[in-house]
Image (cartoon, rainbow, N blue to C red):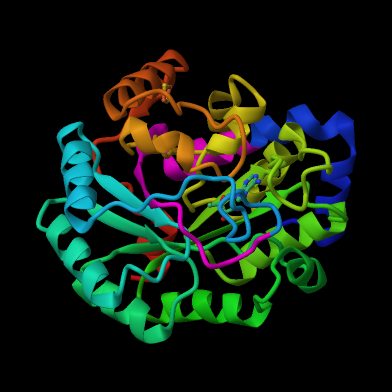
Amino acid sequence: MLSKDEIIDILTDESKTEWLFSLADKVRKDNVGDEVHLRGLIEFSNICKQQCKYCGLRSPNKQIERYRLSEDEIIGCAENAINLGYKTLVLQSGEDDYYTVDKMVTIISEIKKYNVALTLSLGEKSYEEYKAYKEAGADRYLIRIETANKNLYRKMHPNMDYNNRIRCLKDLRELGYEVGTGCLVGLPEQTIEDLANDIIFFKEIEADMIGIGPLITHPQTPLKDEHNGSFWLALKVMALTRIMLPDINIPATTAMETLNPNGRLIALQSGANVVMPNVTATEYRPKYEIYPNKICINDNPDKCRGCISGKIMSIGRKVADTDGQSKHYSKNIK
Ligand code: 5AD
Ligand code: FES
């Protein structure tokens, strides 16, 4: 295992980049194999009560057109994704209180009638809410810490509390979820040491899944005049995360592909073993604008499945036909 100083050194020393990516690729192969797990991502509401400074869905953004799918539409979207072959679905939204516990429980239990793993990404909820979703059949939960630097966290998330974020991660673990978290790379004032601390944080909380992406500044947010994060730095943080947490799931994130046309394939060859293709209906895609220039906004679920499968095969990997439970979870947590 690497010390903080070693992590900082690797993040800083350009001459170690190639070595880092090939080591992460080997660690990925030895621990989680060559299969790539696809998760069908359903972006079911872009309505959000929070104000994260980087995110286009933040509530003060009055310029985006808001939408929210009905329960039946969400279930229909899930059925479509299941018919396309997805073994894991991710339900993601802004923090939208329209979806009460009762509504979510209905959606979850309807989708769980099919033989699929179900991941939720709905933001901060209470222990009781997480418990109800779990009892309805949800298997996994994604909630990024975004940054493990408390001061920076506070600056980026007005009216939110770092400790509550940690409480969410702890509750999810206690409830038996497979837990995913992650961070943004390139936040204003974020240092290399912060990124090293993020990686150490992932290790400490024993996450089962880690998603890492570069910041892409959104013109309708307070970060509009800041620089985008660096694709290569985000990739390095991801590769180091693979080396430090060998048996977890790591997605090649959509934000990486937004900054580099081959971003997801490069990530799959530098430690990643998961891709989350969009299975939202085309009409809603442009409205789920977390950041600008998101890929695939004019495509449909069928097209994305075929496209990414072809790309995965082109690098000699194969699309898994199992639900791709985190090896870390099956070995240590379950
Ligand atoms: N650039 C890149 N990623 C972003 N996210 C939110 N806004 C942005 C942005 N401007 C990420 C956050 C969140 C995930 C769903 O999307 O890390 O957890
Ligand atoms: Fe959507 Fe390639 S993954 S078009």
Q: Residue at x 45, y 81 (%)?
A: 171
Determine if the magenta segment contains residue 105.
no
**Front-most of 311 and 102?**
102
Residue 4 lies, with reference to residue 287, above or below; the image says: below
Q: Residue at x 84, y 52 (%)?
A: 188
**Looking at the picture, how far across and down is residue 119, in whole percent?**
34, 57
Q: Quadrant of residue 41?
A: top left
Residue most extreme to the left: 113
State which region is magenta.
24-52
**Front-most of 174 and 67?**
67
Residue 220: tell me if it is visible.
yes
**Looking at the picture, how far across and down is residue 221, in whole percent?**
71, 50
- Whether residue 121 sits left or right of residue 135 in the image: it is right
- Whether residue 311 sits left or right of residue 200 in the image: it is left
Residue 116 lies, with reference to residue 154, above or below; the image says: above
Residue 242: tell me if it is visible.
no
Determine if the magenta segment contains residue 43.
yes
How many numbered discs sit on the rendered protein? 0
**Front-most of 231 and 331?**
231
Residue most extreme to the front: 62
